Image (cartoon, helix red, strand yellow):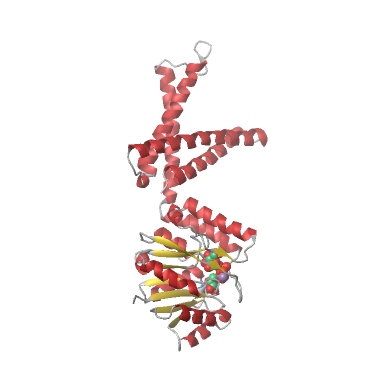
Amino acid sequence: MNKTTSIIIPTYNEHDNITSLVQRLAKSLAGYNYEIVFVDDNSNDGTAELAESLKDKHPVSVIVRKDKRGLASAVVDGLSHAAGSIVAVMDADLQHPPEVVPSLIKAIEEGADISVASRYIEGGGCQGWSFSRKLISRGAIFLAHLLLPATRKVKDPMSGFFIFKKDVVANAQLNPAGFKILLEILMIGRFQNVTEVPFTFVTREKGESKLNARQQIDYLKHIFSLMRRTGELLRFIKFALVGGSGVFVNVGLYWLLTRFAGFTPLDDTVTGSILSGNMAIIISIETSIVTNFLLNNYYTFADRNTGGIKALIGRLLNFNLISLVGALIQIGMMNLLAVGFGLYDLFSLVIAIIIAMMWNYLLNNWWTWRR
Ligand code: GDD
Ligand code: MN
């Protein structure tokens, strides 16, 4: 294969790692066409100067930026300098073993548009991670899978080690904020096939990690920004509007049934039967569930309305079940807040409704209209 792979490597104070990195890449990639693009944020340990000196023997180029603008932004800058039609991204600190790069290239040769070096598929892992670090990592992935459905194809969307055809991002407006450029590419790139290749994220031997608590806040902001830019936030707003319409259906139908169709109003059980009033409310609730379902199916989740009538009925049953549990959650929360904590009942009700709606939204997004 003659296509050139551009390997983008962001660096910040990685002087003690890059010589070994470049040598190991050279060894693994003997016979391949490749170039290494270092993007350094003005390291003060001589990283850029050392990288420059590696040019004599290796296909290396170095971009130096005068201010520290972060990992993702370094990758975006590296992209505009990449000559290859295939682009790989990896860390400079040898936590991403250079020996994995050929299997990433192979995945592209075999038809993948994106291939991710993954810690969370069979054969992958993390060396020497504490329980809490594992938990944070898993939690972050769970959140991405939950809120950004297009990332669900990948078990490790947080990986900083991956490869892709440059076409994937040809028309994409990549937002260079944050640490997680792969998320950005998975959400707004154009691609068909994405695969994963296992690797072990090894411990850092030299230099220090630049990941800190602020990046965890930035991560949440990044997820929100991607939700906004990819229409997932709009989807949630649509879902809330549909839920509001359901309240009108529910109240309106109860009113029609009890005022015009002979059902007994529930406050009038002296003259009529309590059963009749409850029938009216049950019919109203179920009708509003069905109208909510139809609106969500053809409006909120129109892009995921696949399959025939059987699939539609299956989704309706899912939706009903989730709504039922949602109602129980609402009742439970309301009791907890109002009875348990003694909060004002209407306030408790609003909070309980919001929590139940989140439940309904997330479960339906995950399951009923899965993608
Ligand atoms: N240019 C530039 N600017 N490079 C940076 C900056 C920056 O502000 N901050 C970090 N880097 C470079 C580092 O020099 C290193 O090559 C790479 O980015 C990763 O930085 P680390 O500080 O080693 O990050 P980490 O090991 O904590 O995080 C890694 O693992 C995560 C998964 O747990 C990264 O690969 C993340 O992308 C990955 O998500
Ligand atoms: Mn690292």
Above or below residue 276? Residue 204 is below
Image quadrant, ligand 1: bottom right
Q: Is residue 76 visible?
A: no
In the rendered structure, the answer to whether residue 80 lies left or right of residue 214 reads left
Point out the residue furthest to the right here.
Answer: 341
Q: Which residue sits at x=63%, y=36%?
A: 336
Q: Is residue 145 visible?
A: yes
Residue 81, how many percent across, how many down?
Answer: 40, 76
Q: In front: 163, or 80? A: 163
Residue 264, how many percent across, how many down?
Answer: 47, 16
In the rendered structure, the answer to whether residue 367 lies left or right of residue 203 reads left
Above or below residue 352? Residue 51 is below
Q: Which residue sits at x=59%, y=36%?
A: 333
The answer to which quarter of the image holds residue 31 is bottom left
Above or below residue 114? Residue 277 is above
Point out the residue furthest to the front here.
Answer: 123
In the rendered structure, the answer to whether residue 270 lies left or right of residue 59 reads right
Quadrant in the picture for the N terminus: bottom left
- Number of numbered discs: 0
In the rendered structure, the answer to whether residue 344 lies left or right of residue 258 reads right
Q: In front: 349, or 142? A: 142
Residue 164, how many percent across, how many down?
Answer: 40, 67
Point out the residue furthest to the top here.
Answer: 271
Q: In front: 97, or 250? A: 97
Q: Which residue sits at x=44%, y=82%?
A: 60
Point out the residue furthest to the left here.
Answer: 308
